[in-house]
Amino acid sequence: MRLVSWNVNGIKTVSCYHPWINKRLDEILDAFDADIICFQEIKSVHSKLETDMIMPKGYHAFYSLPGRGYCGVGTFVRSNVQVVSVREGRFNLPKGFQEQGRSLITDHGSFVLINVYVPNDHSSPEKEAFKLAFLEAIEKETEQLLTSGRHVIVCGDLNIARLQMDHHDPSSFKKTYYRDIQSFEDLPIRKWMEHYLSDLEMTDTFRFFHPTAQKRYTVWNTFLNYRPANMGTRVDYFLTSQSLKPHLIGANLLTDILGSDHCPITLDLDADIKAMSLNESEQLDLTSKLYTHNWGTFPGKQQKIDLSSFKKAARQPTLEGDNQKTERQKTVAIVQKRISPSKVSKKKDVPITRFFQKKESTQQTALFKDLESDEKVDLVNLQMESVQSKATIEQAKQVWKQILKPPPIPKCRHNEDAVEMTVNKNGMNKGRKFYVCGRLADQRCDFFEWKRNIKRQTSANDNTSDVAHS
């Protein structure tokens, strides 16, 4: 049995990347050859989802979506895999924090699957408190299930790089945290994770199979184009209860699959733990609104209509007998008699191909034949002048294209094309574009140049230069 987890960073953007271009959701799911696929960061609301996302062929779809189109998680289960129940996490978070769209818990009979998307930001005391409260709620939910004797699998984007080998630059945590932290392991969220794994005896499945693997990451900074250089972090996990350890077969990271700033991760279990199969004639008896089959309406779904009220009524006999005509029938008969057959126009059937034939300009051809030879020469010269005039217009267009052509991309000190960026900091230069070296931060030269605005008319006596050095 295979499970897949993937932070898609917007479910609608996946089909814009190779090899998913113009693919339906069920085709994307089939490519993983998995029994259960979990998505995080759906970034959509009910009304914006396409039909293939709501009713993927061959799968049962479950969504927990927020009201504003941010966050969101979805779990897709093959139609032959059992689903006993589905619900969102019972998270009692601090007042004012939005928990909807971050957790989805499905019971598959032989195990319980918790699909979560943990908040990312911990740059302030308030945001750190929210993130820790969410993590503690996951721990409490897991503990209750383990106490009741259930097998538990937690998957998703936890937004925690657990070990130093799970981060391409372990020292950078000091730059992104709001207060001083002495060591990599002292970050509160990392302390929580080690506590969660040890106290509840949960297994980090990837490190269980690859304990010393280096540079194995699941997310990269796409704005700085870190993925080609493999400068990322591992923040996506499959965590399983101790009771499932004998049934684990493998865990992997599908780093070659594009479509998001994250890559999918997989977990393989043996046949002993596989959920019970359903017969094709059986249907899931779920009433939860998280199950898409229970959604009232959505694009492409036709409601069933009772056609019994549209049955043709039986003809009722009249009191004067069946042969008596109604007043309407009499009127129709009178009108038909008044129409003379000779006045009815009988048009011949015209083949449909006639409407697609190219019409010949017979009028122009006859006019040209009637002209004298001198007049024909004048007409030909006039046509040639028209053609030359069109050629002159095309040349003028090409000249203006060269004049209005934007300036070339400048070269940095490595003699490479510079990268265009935009000032986001508030101030007089906000929104202004500039060029810097396109290499990674530790290899970048000090080249800097403002982008010239071609529409801006510069003064003739303006001798200032836009080139500066940082």
Image (cartoon, grey):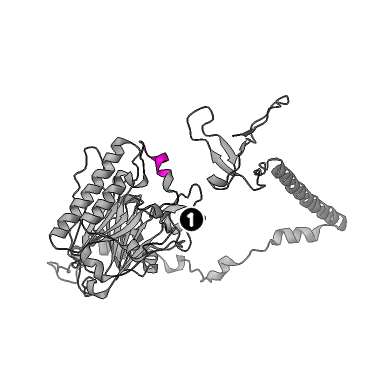
Q: Residue lying furthest front in this view?
A: 182
Prevailing SS of the magenta stretch? helix
Reply above or below: 128 against 36.
above
Residue placed most toward the observer, 345 or 62: 62
Disc 1 residue type (three-letter): Asn
Find residue 154 and report its horizontal and vertical position in percent.
26, 58
Q: Is residue 89 visible from the viewing direction of this image?
A: no
Task: Reply yes or no: does residue 13 show up in magenta.
Answer: no
Residues shaded magenta: 172-178
Q: Secondary structure at mark 1?
A: loop
Q: Residue at x 21, y 43 (%)?
A: 93
Residue found farthest to the right: 374
376 and 429: which one is in front? 429
On screen, residue 313 above or below 131: below
Q: Quadrant of residue 114?
A: bottom left
Where on the picture, by quarter, is residue 12?
bottom left
**Residue of label 1:** 230
Where residue 241 appears, x then y in whole percent?
A: 22, 62
| Residue 347 x, y percent position in the rendering | 50, 68
Residue 185 visible to an observer of this rendering? yes
Q: Quadrant of the N terminus?
A: bottom left
Task: Tell me if mark 1 has few (under 14), some (14-19) or many (20+) residues whose alpha carbon lies within 10 angstroms of its own.
Answer: some
Q: Residue at x 20, y 47 (%)?
A: 91
